[in-house]
Each structure stands twice: as C-alpha cells, then as structure tokens.
C-alpha cells in the first residue's frame, strides 16, 4: 500500500478501532491512529474529518469506525477526492475497491466482530482498482465534485 493508513473512530467505534490498530501494527508499517483514544462520548465528525483530510490531500488511505458507520461515511464523503464506503463484509469491501476505487473503508463498530473486521480490512487493502469502465465512472464523480463545489 502506498502512503499512510489513517484510522479514526468515535466512542462507539473505539473498541473495534483499538482491536484493528493492534492487529494492523503487525503488518502495516505506516499507521496513524488519529483517535479517539477512549470510550468517552465524542463527536464523530471530528475524527472523520481528520482521516478524510489526509486522504483528500493524497497522503494515503483511511479506515473509520463508528457505531453504524453511517455518520462517518457522510462526513468523509464531504471531502474532495474521498470515496468512503461502508462495508459490512468482505464482498462489499472488494467491490468498493474494484469498482469504486474507494479510499476510505468505513466499519460499523456495533455490527462488526473484530475477526470479521480484520478480514474486511485485509480485503480492502489488498484489492486493486479495476479501472476501465469503472475508471470512467469514478472520473465522473470527480467531475461532479468540481462542478458542484461552491465558489
């Protein structure tokens, strides 16, 4: 994987994030945990923005975890060039990479067991983007970002 892997969560995703960080530190050399660092209540947009900002500026890929995965997905997809995908299984992670060139994986901390999450992450990180007709579609997403961006 090129660049860093940024990971962040809110309080509802904290336990799963901590499990993933421990597992990823064994195989991912450049991992940046942006928090949260406890299970105390916090605001998911703060952590989603930190990860998405780094992905948007081309520094690497990201993983976000909140209770349902929905809030983190919404925030991350506000950033130019970020294609965040909520994946609940290995198949959706594979398709998110192959067809959508997703660069942020979002997990549901309250719906995903640590073992399943680790497999989803492995698939996400190992699967290349197919390009071709999918590249044309991803390019259209970028064009929409440019056209719809307020002046």
Image (cartoon, rainbow, N blue to C red):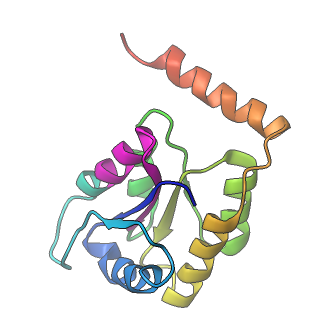
51 is within the stretch colored magenta? yes
Residue nearer the viewer, 48 or 54: 54
Q: Measured from the top left, where is residue 31 in percent x and y?
A: 39, 68
From the top left corner, tell me how far across and down residue 60 is, in percent: 47, 52
Q: Is residue 76 left or right of residue 145?
A: left
Is the N terminus in the top left, top right, bottom left or bottom right quadrant?
Answer: bottom right
124 vs 114, nearest the viewer: 124
Is 49 on the left-hand or right-hand side of 124?
Answer: left
Q: Residue furthest left?
A: 40
Number of numbered discs overlaid on the protein picture: 0
In the displayed structure, would residue 132 be above or below residue 84?
above
**Looking at the picture, does residue 20 appear above or below residue 63?**
below
Q: Which residue appears at 67% of the width and 67% of the height?
A: 126
**x, y (%) of residue 71?**
38, 55
Q: Residue furthest right?
A: 133
In depth, the one of 31 and 138 nearer the eye is 31
The residue positioned 45% from the left and 72% from the top of the image is 29
Rendered-image quadrant of the C terminus = top left
| Magenta run includes residue 53 | yes
- Residue that appears at 84% across and 38% down: 132
Expressed as whole percent of the image width and height from the top left, the position of residue 34 reads 27, 63
* 138 in relation to 75, above or below: above
In the rendered image, the residue lying farthest to the top is: 151
Residue in the picture at 72% in, 56% down:
128
Instruction: Say left or right for 64 vs 98.
Output: left
Which segment did they paint magenta?
48-65
């Amino acid at each position: 994987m090129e660049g860093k892997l940024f990971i962040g969560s809110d309080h509802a995703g904290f336990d799963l994030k901590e499990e993933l960080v421990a597992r990823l530190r064994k195989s991912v050399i450049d991992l940046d945990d942006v928090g949260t660092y406890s299970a105390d209540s916090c605001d998911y947009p703060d952590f989603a923005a930190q990860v998405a900002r780094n992905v948007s500026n081309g520094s690497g890929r990201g993983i976000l975890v909140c209770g349902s995965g929905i809030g983190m997905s919404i925030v991350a997809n506000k950033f130019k060039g970020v294609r965040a995908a909520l994946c609940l299984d290995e198949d959706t992670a594979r398709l998110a990479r192959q067809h959508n060139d997703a660069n942020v994986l979002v997990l549901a901390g309250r719906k995903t067991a640590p073992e399943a999450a680790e497999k989803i992450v492995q698939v996400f990180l190992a699967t290349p983007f197919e390009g071709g007709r999918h590249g044309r579609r991803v390019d259209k997403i970028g064009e929409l970002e440019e056209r719809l961006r307020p002046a």
